[in-house]
Image (cartoon, helix red, strand yellow):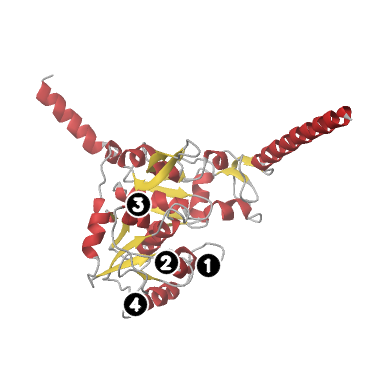
Amino acid sequence: MTRKTGWMILAILFVLSPLSAAFGAWTNPDLLYSVAQAEKIVGDSTWVILDCRGQEVYEKGHIPGAIVLGKKSAKSLLRDGSARTFQDPGKYEKILGEAGIGNATRVLVYSDMKHKLMDDAFITFWLLEYLGHTDVHLLDGGFDAWTKAGKPVETAVAKREPAVFKAQPKKSAFATSEELLTLANGTNKNIQLVDCRTKEEFEGYDIRALRGGHIPNTFKNASHVTYFEQKKDEKTGKDVPTGILSEAAVAKALDGLDANGRVVFLCHSGGRSAYGYFAARLMGFTNAANFDDGWFIWATNYQKNYPVEDEQWIELARIDEAEKKIKSLETKVADLEALIKTLTDKK
């Protein structure tokens, strides 16, 4: 075989690969905006820069011209009290329209690292796409990256003229418990489920619902924290995410998945899984979805008793934590008793 033929074969294999994005290049890079790109749209009336953090934090400093949806964070305003998506699209039409976001308005969302690794922004991105908005983008690194770059910050509250937003729900971006039940019971083998929770949650060691464990036939467990560039924390010495998405890390997390197949992301309540949805969109996945019910509903709905693998009802993590505290107290008591004995003997 000639060298030319060999390269041709490699090129064909690359194109036919289920996840060619695994080589580390965004397929849809325009979804992710850098600080430099964001700076260029400040003051552009065709854009809405949406601060997803909530009024109080927003008024302490935000990107010039950015708007906020209300007193609560975007993820709280755009979902019900159980962290589920509103079933009535009219609620979204009212909230977004009053904020000045129309169907043709270009939107850049951002949050900061203090708010659960920018949950607000990723959830808002997914919700807007689910509602049918086709021009949504996310600021890489969020407000932290903006301020670190020395860009201007303002505290004045910005308002826009109301717009008309008509929701056109994209059903494929929304996964339900009923859909995942077909995977769990083995009747549908065409769903690739990615669990974005921690390894401890996945294995049933850390329980945050009625039951611990994971959904049977889950394709892989890949925590959302691994998607980001990491840096050493000077105090703990541990690696912590910077908020900047890493092409190589995302490719590794999604490795092995068929980018043209059905891919669903799961976490406890639809937050961490929204990171997975965004990462999949960056990588060019054509049929990605966020599991809106999340593990909390799946593992707690006792009437339907959805199947759970590695099922646990007792939270071992808390038991271990309690045992460690007891041992620490025992050590302190022993030290105190020894000190008392020493002082008594001296007398």
- Report the residue marked by disc 2: 60
How far, Cα to Cα, is label 2 from label 1?
26 Å
Contact between labelled residues 3 and 2, with CB atoms less than 8 Å apart: no
- Looking at the rendered structure, the kind of residue marked 4 is Lys
- Residue 304 placement, left or right of 139: right
**Closer to the camera in the image, 307 or 241:** 241
User: As shown in the figure, which amino acid type bears the numbered disc 3?
Assistant: Gly
The residue beneath circle 3 is 141
Q: Earlier in the sequence, mark 2 or mark 4?
A: 2
Residue 61 screen position, x and y as percent: 38, 65
Q: Nearer the viewer, mark 2 or mark 1?
A: 2
Q: Which mark is residue 159?
A: 4
Q: Nearer the viewer, mark 2 or mark 3?
A: 2
Looking at marks 2 and 3 on the same chain, the residue that comes earlier in the sequence is marked by 2
Say which mark, if any, is on residue 80: 1
- Tell us which disc is closer to us: 2 or 4: 2
Kind of element beneath mark 1:
loop
Q: CA distance from mark 2 to mark 3?
A: 19 Å
Give the percent coordinates (x, y) of residue 232: 42, 38
Q: For marks 4 and 1, give the CA distance.
A: 25 Å
In screen coordinates, is 128 left or right of 43?
right
